[in-house]
Each structure stands twice: as C-alpha cells, then as structure tokens.
Amino acid sequence: MAFLLNCPNCGERNVGEFRFGGELKVRPEPNSSRDAWTDYIYFHRNVAGDQSEWWYHSFGCRKWMVALRNTVTNEVKDVLFPEDVS
C-alpha cells in the first residue's frame, strides 16, 4: 500500500522515494552480551500500531529520518531527523 512521508527537507513525497531501514531500536554497548546483540539484530517487535522507524530518502535529499507510523493504517504521524528525536 502506498502512502506519503513528509520529508523535513523535501516536503511530502510518495513512500516509493524512500528506503525502509527498520524499526528504531537502542543499540547495545559494544561489550554487551551475545544475547543482547542477538536480540538487537534478530528480534523485531512488529507492533500493530504506532512504531518509530528509520527511513532513507534515496530519491531526494539522501538523508536518514525517523518516522512515527501506524503499522495498521500506514498513517504517518511525525517525521524528524535523528538529531531532533528525543
């Protein structure tokens, strides 16, 4: 299903201009356990509802951004650059 993402640099664009980078997760410390790294790499929440996700604007400004998107309706609630995410 196509939907629109509002790039902070380029404005509203079709999702086909972007590359999905996965859900936003906290990276473990370099000396973390094997279990922590396994969970980080292989475990995905796949929530039915709001989820923060990485998107890369490959056909536009070529910047990474974080979008808060409802995975059921594909409604994009907010799009920010990583440095603006709290």
Image (cartoon, rainbow, N blue to C red):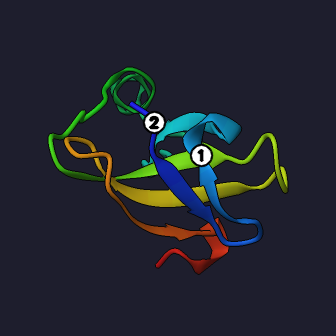
61 and 28: which one is in front? 61
Residue plotted at (62% across, 34% down): 16
Question: Where residue 47 sits in the image (x, y, percent)?
Answer: 19, 40
Image mark for residue 78: none
Is 72 positioned to the left or the right of 28 in the image? left
- Above or below: residue 14 compared with residue 36: below
Decide which of 23, 60 is in the foreground and name it: 60
Q: Residue at x 52, y 74 (%)?
A: 85
Q: Residue at x 38, y 20 (%)?
A: 42
Q: How many marks?
A: 2
Position of residue 53 measured from the top left corner of the image (x, y, whole percent): 45, 48
| Residue 29 seen in this snapshot | no
Residue farthest to the left? 48
Q: Along the horizontal axis of the image, is 60 left or right of 51?
A: right
The residue wearing badge 2 is 2
- Residue underneath mark 1: 14
| 68 lies left or right of 20 | left
Looking at the image, which is closer to me, 29 or 77? 77
| Tag 2 and tag 1, C-beta contact below 8 Å | yes
Tell me the SS state at disc 2.
loop
Q: Amino acid at mark 1?
A: Asn
Label 2: how many Cα within 10 Å (few below 14, some 14–19, many 20+): few
- The quarter of the rendered structure image containing the N terminus is top left
Q: Residues within 10 Å of mark 1 (few under 14, many from 20)?
A: few
Whole-percent x, y for residue 41 in the image: 45, 25
Tell me the amino acid under the disc marked 2: Ala
Q: Residue at x 24, y 35 (%)?
A: 45
Q: Position of residue 61 (x, y in %)?
A: 84, 56
